[in-house]
Image (spheres, grey):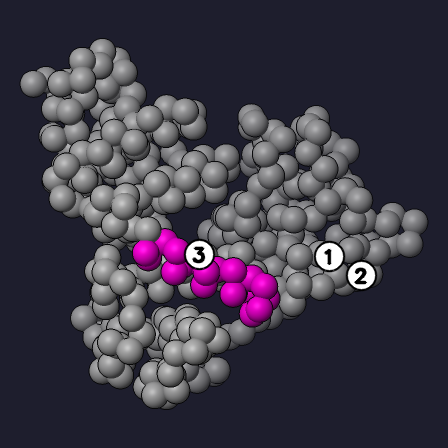
Amino acid sequence: MRRPNVQPGPRHWLETSVFQPFTARYIEHLTHERYAAGTSRNYLCCIAHFAHWVSREQLALEEIDEAVRARFIAEHLSVCDCPYPVHRVPIGHRAAISHLLGVLRAEDAIPCAEARDECSRELAAFDVYMCDVAGLAGNTRRQRLRIIHRFLLEQFGHEKVTIAHIDTAAVRHFVLGEHKSWSPGTIRVVGGAIGCYFRFRSMSGDRVSHLLSAIPRAACWRLAGLPQVLSKAQIDELLASFDQDFPSRRRALAMVRCLTDLGLRCNEVAKLHLDDIDWRQGTLRVTGTKGRRTDILPLPKATGSAIAAYLRHERPETRNRSIFVRHEAPYHVPIQAGVVRRAVLAAYQRCG
């Protein structure tokens, strides 16, 4: 069996991922199915790309299923900026990952699709509660779903979820993450997710008061870490770093101006639309905020000038009505908050 020739970058992603023990079996499967050498190589590159994303998302092997594949294709491929060489064609990834799931299930590395039904239904109902009752934003819901998924797998595997079988010691052990040495901030996030899940179960009639009281409350002093905001001098230095010439400079400056001048979150900047700006009144409408409301903010001259310069001189032609768009095909696909975050991180690096 000849191993397909994969370039060093993707090969490293694969060899350092949770899929590494199953790579040879995957290649054997493709060979047995009589795929051409070129197709096998392309599929292996797709799996390497998927493995790189799985590692960045810190997903465990037992979490990999069709839902994770759908997330990867919908949320990552459309905004992918992974370094060369990567494949970004959804249909190729969908086929390659389908073969991978078959191999993993044949090796008993992940449960069969039917075994996930109970857990999937539980998580789907919890997601509806978080959206319709708790009013949580999409990113928060996805983060809590990942945490609760791991918690349920640890408590029940793929058996029926029975809250009465959870004891307080198991709750404390999971939230504290004793074997992972979690930081106080991580403990607060995990504890918040567990508390939200138990409140959801209480609406179904489960007795959870003793479990809620068992959730550890980690001390996380407000002044114990880094300063909460940058100083004026640091902000001036940050903005001055955009005087340098680099790709997508005007887009990056306009996005960072929205953060520093208006105090917007990265997700809010990514969701800004052309119709949200009233140039005559000098205002900016912000929708989809964390509080699920619409705010009208004054648009400072410096911020408006940065946005206008981007729209006139750098924004590509596209049917996308977002202010900030992709600078490579497909141009009509919305950007994600990660594009805004990376613009800030790059500015930090330029500032040293």
Q: What secondary structure is the stretch in magenta mostly built from? A: helix
Residue 332 % position (x, y)? 63, 31
In primary-sequence order, the first of circles 1 and 3 is 3
Residue at the farthest front position: 205
Identity of the residue drawn at 73% across and 32% down:
313
Question: Which segment is the magenta one?
Answer: 118-136
**The N terminus lies in which quarter of the figure?**
top left
Q: Amino acid at mark 3?
A: Ala
Q: Decide: few, some or many residues near mark 1? Use Cα within 10 Å; few <14, some 14-19, many ≥20.
A: some
Q: How far from the left and from the top, in percent, is residue 288? A: 66, 57
Q: Which residue is mark 2?
A: 296
Query: Where on the picture, by quarter, is residue 133?
Result: bottom right
Residue 46 quadrant: top left
Helix, strand or loop under label 1 = strand
Can residue 265 be seen in this snapshot? Answer: yes
The percent position of residue 77, horizontal first and vertical second, equals 45, 35
Q: Are marks 2 and 3 in contact (CB under 8 Å)?
A: no
Mark 1 near mark 2, Cβ–Cβ under 8 Å? yes
- Circle 1 sits on which residue? 286
